Image (tube, helix red, strand yellow):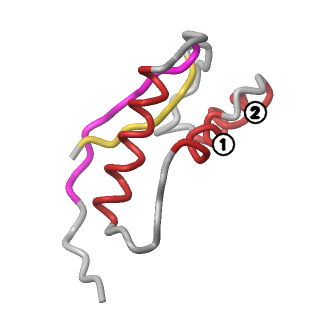
Amino acid sequence: MIESMLTTIDNPHDPFTDYESWLAFDMISQHNSAGFLARVVVLSDELSLADQRRAIDEAIDEIVEENVTGMYKKVSREVPDPPDVVEF
């Protein structure tokens, strides 16, 4: 499975392995990437975990595609598939 995150071209920190430093740099630089993503993505508790991940990935793609400032980029990594989750 591929896991993706939104970041900026000037952030030297890896949001996967050093999230706290990544977030501190992002906030100090006044990018607020997580907040921007939260405003774009449409989520619901009614969505499955897989659908939520898909919605986040699509929102990241939209931000990067409409990237008028050239500041944002998508970073991805391969992660093991999660075990099956039973939803009630």
From the viewer's perspective, tell me whether residue 67 is left or right of residue 20. Answer: left
Nearest to viewer (mark 1 / mark 2): 1
Q: Residues within 10 Å of mark 2 (few under 14, many from 20)?
A: some
Q: Residue at x 36, y 40 (%)?
A: 58
Q: Amino acid at mark 2?
A: Met
**In the displayed structure image, the side of residue 31 where residue 49 appears, left or right:** left
Q: Quadrant of the C terminus?
A: bottom left
**Percent position of residue 62, x then y:** 42, 30
Instruction: Label 1, secondary structure: give it.
Output: helix
Which residue does the numbered mark 2 point to in the structure image? 27
Mark 1 or 2, nearer chain start: 2
Magenta region, residue range: 71-81
**Circle number at residue 46:** none
Mark 1 and mark 2: Cα distance apart in space: 10 Å
Residue 38 in the image, given as x and y percentages of width and height: 59, 47
Numbered marks: total = 2
- Amino acid bearing label 1: Gly
Circle 2 SS class: helix
**Residue at 33%, 43% in the rendered image:** 3
Q: Quadrant of residue 5?
A: top left
Instruction: Return the mark for residue 35.
Output: 1
Instruction: Tell me where residue 39 appears, x and y as whole percent.
Output: 61, 45
Our reading of the magenta stretch's main secondary structure is strand
Mark 1 near mark 2, Cβ–Cβ under 8 Å?
Answer: no
**Residue beneath the point at 57% across and 21% down:** 8
> Crowdedness of circle 1 by 10 Å Cα count: few (<14), some, many (20+)?
few
On screen, 24 above or below 49?
Answer: above
Magenta segment: does it hold 49?
Answer: no
Q: Which residue lies at the image location 32% right of the left edge and 69% below the top edge?
A: 48
Going by the image, does 10 lie left or right of 15? right
